[in-house]
Amino acid sequence: MFIITFILGSCYSTNSLSQAVKVNADSSALFANQSNNFIPDYQKTNFINKEDSPEGFPFLSGDGLRLYFTSNRGNGDRLHFSSRKTINDKFGEPGILSKNIKPGFVNGTLTNDELTICMSYKGQIYLSKRASLHNEFSEPVLIRLKEQFTSPSISPDGNEIIVMISGYGSPRILKKVCDFEYAEAGYNPLPGFWGNDKGQYSKDGLAFYISRANHERNDTWLYTRKSVKDRFIKTKEFNIQKEGIKSILNPSINSDGTIVICTINNAEPRYWQQSDLLLFNFQVNRN
């Protein structure tokens, strides 16, 4: 795992792990070219990325202190959790998210209060709830739909879920009917995007980030809307290629847009077993 810290404004890093680095505030790239010399000995103290175990599909809490992700650590693909005391600390040793959420449940995203988690299992979408951050999640409940979907992203208020059709097609949007019931409310809520890649809402629900990688390029699309009742429109496209990393996917961003965590893959994007997580600080500009 790599940590790269940028602060926009004065455009200089103040993190003790790095030297002062000037960043172009007008650049559309989310990453600047940095050397591994800025992260001395970090691999040895990293508790998140485990050698020979894939980590991916991160969800970062609004305050940047809690991290939910999918990993296979010898017990099958399942959801894991890690936390830290402040945003200047490293994330601690991760553990299984909940004894009630068994292996096979993956791709979790949460509401802003982190009391509802939406996830996929064998082409079906499930929800699980808990009473507080200190309680166990409940047994997952199936959202009954006519088709098989994957890669769910639940909105911060829990009233929407954007999903992809398994294997093909454009995104769909599900609207909440009651507690564990959602209904299809339309095709392609992300105009101009096709495929089954996983995206994620911003914490205010007014933006949606989604990435796609192939041999030639790696892009993140940003969609925005004026209110949670409006449709998304495609606003901008970021080229987030970084030297030595072939694919950067599944961005999850904290409330004020200063911390980004994503899946990186130094092999082919389809080789899930090669995935790791990358965290960096940056001011994400939606305009």
Image (spheres, rainbow, N blue to C red):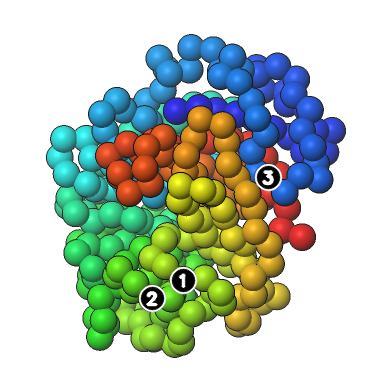
Tell me the tag on residue 194: 1
Three-letter code, disc 2: Gly
Q: Would you identify the image quadrant in which residue 182 lies?
A: bottom left
Badge 3: how crowded within 10 Å, few (<14), some, or many (20+)?
A: some
The residue located at (44%, 87%) in the rendering is 185
Mark 2 / mark 3, whichever is N-terminal: 3
Q: Which residue is mark 2?
A: 169
Q: Position of residue 49 (x, y in %)?
A: 36, 30
The count of marks equals: 3
In this picture, is 146 found above or below 83? below
Q: Position of residue 232 (x, y in %)?
A: 61, 75
Mark 2 / mark 1, whichever is N-terminal: 2
Tell me the tag on residue 105: none
Given contact means CB atoms under 8 Å apart, are the residues at marks 2 and 1 in contact? Answer: yes
Spatial CA distance of label 3 from label 1 is 22 Å
List the single residue furthest toward the front.
Answer: 216
